[in-house]
Image (spheres, rainbow, N blue to C red):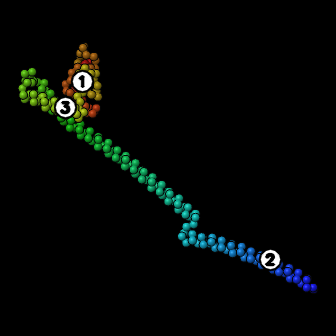
Amino acid sequence: MTEKKKKDVSLKEEKKAEKKEAEVKEETAEAAGETEETAAEAAAEEAGEASGETPEKAEDKGDKEKSKIDELNDRVMRQMAEFENYRKRTEKEKAAMFETGAKSVIEKLLPVVDNFERGLAGLTDEGKKDPFAEGMQRIYKQLMDELEKLEVKPIEAVGKEFDPNLHNAVMHVEDEEAPDNTVVEELQKGYTYRESVVRHSMVKVAN
């Protein structure tokens, strides 16, 4: 073999060796990359296992927490609504109790008013000028003014059509001058308190 051929063979061998070395390095690099990726995945998986939470578990936990918050919010809203209803019901009951109590007191005062009116109605014109009678008239007027401030009003009866919601008919009379079912005389005055009847008017009705 000539010297030239020897050199050519040597060059070919060197190129083959270099190519083989390059291939080995490339394979080694790929293997190292795969190993690092696998190690990272394994580390992440181990960390998840160590914390006891996988991505699926973490998502499930978030859904449960949101559901719990919604449940608590709903419970709070229900309790607030129940309290508001309780407050309104309590205020309504208080108002009803006050109305009942006020009507009871007014009902007890009405006989006093009746006696004042009977006593004053029996006075003569001369008797009305007596200082004592004048004092009684002033007291009566003051009493009626206070009742009016409390929204206590007498029921209109004479000349009005008989209304069973306001009047209590104790007598029926024949009266050609008055239309049928008309109140012709008031025997006892009736009163209302805030549009509610405290005492019905005792009346005489024309047939």
Give, as a three-letter code, the residue at label 3: Asp
Give, as a three-letter code, the residue at label 1: Ala
Residue underneath mark 1: 157
Q: Quadrant of residue 35?
A: bottom right
Q: In the rendered view, does 16 fall on the left or right side of 106?
A: right
Q: Position of residue 23 (x, y in %)?
A: 77, 75
Q: Secondary structure at mark 3?
A: helix
Name the disc covering residue 19, or none. 2
Mark closer to the chain start, 2 or 1: 2
Residue underneath mark 3: 145
Residue at 10% from the left image edge and 30% from the top image edge? 135
**Alpha carbon of mark 1 to alpha carbon of mark 3: how far?**
21 Å
Q: In the rendered view, does 51 fall on the left or right side of 73?
A: right
Above or below: residue 20 compared with residue 84? below
Confirm whether residue 24 shows in the render.
yes
Residue at 39% from the left image edge and 50% from the top image edge? 80
Q: Position of residue 17 (x, y in %)?
A: 81, 80
